[in-house]
Amino acid sequence: MTNTAAHTVAGTTDSVTDLDETRKKLDDLVIEADAGARNPVNPLIAKGLLGVALLWSLFQLWIASPLPFALGIGVLDDTQSRAIHLAFAVMLSFLAYPAFKSSPRRHIPLIDIIMSAVGAFCAAYLFLFYDALSSRSGNPSEMDIYVACVGMVLLLEATRRALGPPLVIIATIFLLYAFFGNWEYLPEVLRHKGQSLNKTASHQWLTTEGVYGVALGVSTSFVFLFVLFGALLDKAGAGNYFIKVAFSLLGHLRGGPAKAAVLSSGLTGLISGSSIANTVTTGTFTIPLMKRVGFSGAKSGAVEVASSVNGQIMPPVMGAAAFLMTDYVGIAYNEVVKHAFIPAIISYIALLYMVHLEALKGGMQALEKPIKRTFKQSLLLSGIVVVSFILFSIACYYVLNFLKQALGDSAPYIIGVGLFVVYFFLLKFSCTVPELEEDDPSSDVVSLPETGPTVKAGLHFLLPIALLVWCLMIERLSPGLSAFWATAFMIFILVTQRPLKTFFRKQEEYKRACKAGFDELLDGLVSGARNMIGIGVATAAAGIIVGAVSLTGIGPKLTEVVEIVAGGSLLGILLLTALICLILGMGLPTTANYIVVATLMAPVVQTLGAQNGLIVPLIAVHLFVFYFGIMADVTPPVGLASFAAASISGADPIRTGVQAFAYSLRTAILPFFFIFNTELILVGVDGFFDALIVFFYSGLAILLFSAAAQGYFLVRNTLLENLMLLLVSFSLFIPQFWINQIYPAYEASGSSDAVKILDSLEPGDQIRIHAKGLNEQDQEVTIATYIAVPDEGKSGKEILSRFGLTEDPFAPKSDNTIYEVAYESRAFQTGIEFEFEFVGVDVPAEQPHAKLVFIPALLLLGFIIMQQSVRRRSEIALSAIKE
């Protein structure tokens, strides 16, 4: 062997070794963050830890299935299920997560075993003594209080181990606030009388107002099964399949690895509940390839972080926040998905475009295509694939609907048999191409996979996702039951795919294939449970914050604080709320993150928006705080996803986080726009065609914003062109703003009689009322808010009553004083109080259609394109002369 050859082999060996070490560190990072870092060497202890996790998954599958009701065995109500769910989460927190970095990983200390048992007992207390607690509701015994106190302390410790200190600190502050709300050093606006230990403990632990509240209920009913579904999909090989498909579709383009990273992270985000796991899963392969084609270490890591974190806003799972929104907002799950869809899609399209612009700026070259095709051939092939998929989906929808109507009650069974037939056909079809293997991104030659064989190799992975979407969106089953059927089908796939592939490929390793299938199933069930530990304790700990808010009444007080700090400016309020969401979200997983920010900040935005004359739908408010909550995974200094990406790329994590935040600006601006233009989340949009128009104009707007953010459109932008691009983008996003400057949306009626004016309006119209009075601090305030006329016929008095204002029969007819304000009504939430006075009513004014603004905006865009086209031709000609 020559020295050169020896050096090459040694270099390759070192590269592989380095890659293995990096992957091991990353696996440890994901395990430590999501599943617990402890791995006992004692086989008995190890099997015990595995058995507890496995038992938790089986318990969750049992309560989600129809079997308890069909058999009449093991039927539990929501409170009992939540108690058992939390008991598993607390027990596994102490068993799987070491207390400190220096604590042992290879065995479980006795103190941790004791704490796990005591914590599980306290958590399951509501289940174990359910009847006794029900009989003395509101009158807790000494034992109840002791269990509650010990339980909360152990819950906070379990949360610290699984998630670190941020959530524990926040929850502790709220607990202290409940006890010491009358502290003299607190600002006057935040004071309350203070609560006793007995009342706080009972409220937090023995009712469903605190720890066992809505958040833990959603974790028990929905989130666990979706996390388990994702874990099983990943064990089956779907994660690798999505990465391969993304590279086969986009890898040959300029900056292709980065574009493939965006697409693969988006696909993985469909099933993943963790932005860190998403970053590591796809980034291990994509980041080295991005660096190879010319991206810097910081930029390659930032692209992966921005695309992975965006997976949390992608329906149908949305990091499990979608299911929490159904309870917090009070709308059906399919409505949440509908509202979240366009912002998520255009955000990913914009990131693809930003990556493309980065490749153009850097003069990057594409990787070599496995099959040479002209641009027209590639475009035609892509078009055929997309159109075929759309036509196939439409055909399936109508065929299945026809079968449902034609077959009646037997339809589910026959369609189910058809699903298994399709599965067997697709699995046999996948055996006509080689098995997909994981590539080594550090190798000298990286060959892009061919699109056709790559797509064929895993089409059966789409079936459980399609089943999940069908159950959720078409059959309108509950999220829990939908996830159960999808997970049950996924279990069937895990058990059967390896033996069937062995049969179809005519191999003779059936026993090994069957064993591998069951091992993957067992691994998936255990991984799903361990991935849920952090979410389980996080939702419970976040319940402490929710309980403290309801116990102390801090919600309205927080509204006043934010309004004072923001100076009454609605934009200032939104900016301050976004900043608070970023701070509260630091270091928290998506689910806990959303619970905290939704509890504290969503009511603030809606109330202050109404007081500033802007009616914001509740779903828009919750999406606003959710978007900025997940941005904490990107933002330095705590952005955990940025640290994970930096460990792969070798770049500085802070620089990676700053660059990822720059790429994520297109996501950060969307919440501001859909607060002011709710069409972006399809509120007030009727019909598919109208939704398509919204998609196109909002998609163009976000692309132009991205071009301005990158400083590059057709060529590098001048400062003036950047400003013009931002102006066009703003005009497309919020055309109503310019119309309102010329033609005011409302005109004063000169009357304060809201009842008569509401009587005269048509359904769909709305008036703006002005009410004046003294608030709790005896300060005179004027509040402007809207009242809409519903589609069904209602009198003015009925509309006001639904808003929360009722007429006092004993008041003088000419008196404009408000004598009745319903508690927790919309009128109450906007700040209108007893003895406020109507001082005016504004009626809608005639305005031109807002979309007319698009005409001058597009003309300005055309001017920019002309300007840059001339410069681009000049640059190409100059480059040709130099060559």
Image: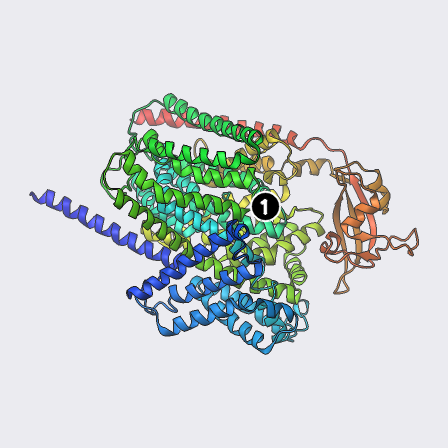
The quarter of the rendered structure image containing the C terminus is: top left
Which colour scheme appears in the figure? rainbow
> In the image, what residue occupies the spot 61% across and 45% down?
332
Front-lying residue, 535 or 95 = 95
Residue at point 64%, 31% (across, down) = 851
Q: Amino acid at mark 1?
A: Phe
Q: Residue furthest bottom?
A: 142
Estimate the x, y position of residue 143 in percent, counting from the top left.
56, 77
Look at the numbered disc 1 and give the secondary structure of its residue: helix
- The quarter holding residue 25 reads bottom left
Q: Position of residue 845 (x, y in %)?
A: 77, 36
Res. 180 in view: no
Please tell me which residue is depicted at 80% across the width and 50% down the height of the picture: 801
- Picture coordinates of residue 233 (x, y %)? 40, 45
Q: How many numbered circles does the render carry?
A: 1
Would residue 465 appear left or right of 878 to someone viewing this image? right
Label 1 neighbour load within 10 Å: few <14, some 14-19, many 20+? some
Please state, as top left, top right, bottom left or bottom right, where the N terminus lies in the image: top left
Q: Is residue 105 left or right of residue 603?
A: left
* Along the viewing direction, whichever of 704 and 232 lies nearer the viewer: 232
For mark 1, what is the residue? Answer: 672
Q: Could you say which is closer to the camera, residue 157 or residue 22?
A: 157
Q: Residue furthest left?
A: 1
Along the line of sight, the residue nearer the viewer: 681 or 696:
681
Q: Position of residue 75 (x, y in %)?
A: 54, 56
Q: Is residue 681 left or right of residue 838?
A: left
Q: Is residue 498 above or below residue 646?
A: above
Q: Is residue 417 above or below residue 578?
A: above
Asked whether residue 552 appears in the rendered view, the answer is: yes
